[in-house]
Image (cartoon, helix red, strand yellow):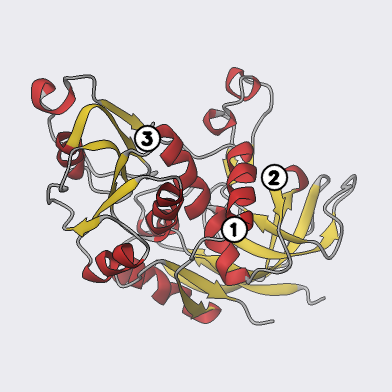
Amino acid sequence: MAETMTAWVVRRPGPMSSGPLERVRLPIPAPAPGEVLVEVEVCAVCRTDLHLAEGDLPPERPDTVPGHEVVGRVVAQGAGVRRPATGTRVGVAWLHSTCGECRYCLRGSENLCPNASYTGWDVNGGYAQYVTALEDYVYELPEDLPAERLAPLLCAGIIGYRALARADLPPGGRLGVYGFGASAHLVAQVAIAQGAAVHVLTRSRRAQELALELGAASAGGAYDAPPEPLDAAILFAPVGDLVPVALKALDMGGTLAVAGIHLTDIPSLTYEEDLFYERTLRSVTANTREDGRAFLKLATRHPLRVTTVPYDFDRADQALADLAADRVTGAAVLRLPG
């Protein structure tokens, strides 16, 4: 194995037009006790990576390697690792570690752990040829599915699954989905399979067409009113102005779940128009490993249509620029040479 690897780092956070990503050579990391070293095959591109690159999500360390939707193989084990074995296909996701001791971890809410660390933010992620991860935080993946299809499931899919649960959609209910990128196009399929009527609200004409192809009951502009009152809604677009829009679209007793890690400021809300009649506004904060296991089990047993736009690894900066400009329909994925 070579001693160094190619990676992309966030050198100067700022607009994509300013070139915040830089391609560099880094030492291949050695797995610490309890860690595995994963050779990356594919890393999907998440909007969180864009927030990190542009500075909306302040870097926790200089020259961070982004990326937390990694599909690869274990090529080395640190001391004490029992599984996964060398050669196992695994996924490395957003949640890198938790303390396991705080009140949140002990009650099953490890996604709220104040001592948690995150892949591609606190520790280097998958925009690289190799990445390390804790053995207890990787997901073993099936061999019979393409890596490009699996990678978006590791964040877009998992966080969408948690957002759907947080939205409290009743059986056979009416769901509004605001924004229709990587996560939304997956969760919409889950909701439709469960019998929901899904209404997609997004500014992209191509995304509207994809929504209808996937079985959405309707697809309109982001600020349009859906054709019927909603029992639940999920806001994926990082646009605070859409919060009152989505709340007004809810029926009495409806819930709006905000799925993004970053959101622009929410305008003033009117209690009577926006929140009265027991409408609920709630956030979605990361996910637990149990969320990941449950969703991946569902998604591999009942395959979802994963719409991807592939990019060669040396075009990672272009992939993020296209995401910033809404030129990606579905999920962008970086293919590493292998």
Of circles 1 and 2, the one toward us is 2
Name the N-terminal-most of marks 1 and 2: 1
* Mark 3, residue position: 169
The x, y position of residue 296, in whole percent, is 61, 51
Of circles 1 and 3, the one toward us is 3
Of residues 276 and 27, which is closer to you in this image? 276
Q: Are marks 1 and 2 in contact (CB under 8 Å)?
A: no
- Image quadrant where one finds the C terminus: bottom right
- The amino acid type found where label 3 is placed reads Leu
Using the rendered view, name the quadrant where residue 92 is placed. Answer: bottom right
Tell me the number on the disc at residue 137: 2
The x, y position of residue 69, in whole percent, is 56, 59
Left or right: 234 in relation to 66: left
Using the rendered view, name the quadrant where residue 46 is placed. Answer: bottom left
The x, y position of residue 21, in whole percent, is 44, 68
Q: Residue at x 65, y 44 (%)?
A: 293
Give the Cα distance between marks 2 and 3: 29 Å
Name the N-terminal-most of marks 2 and 3: 2
* Mark 1, residue position: 125
Q: Residue at x 17, y 43 (%)?
A: 228
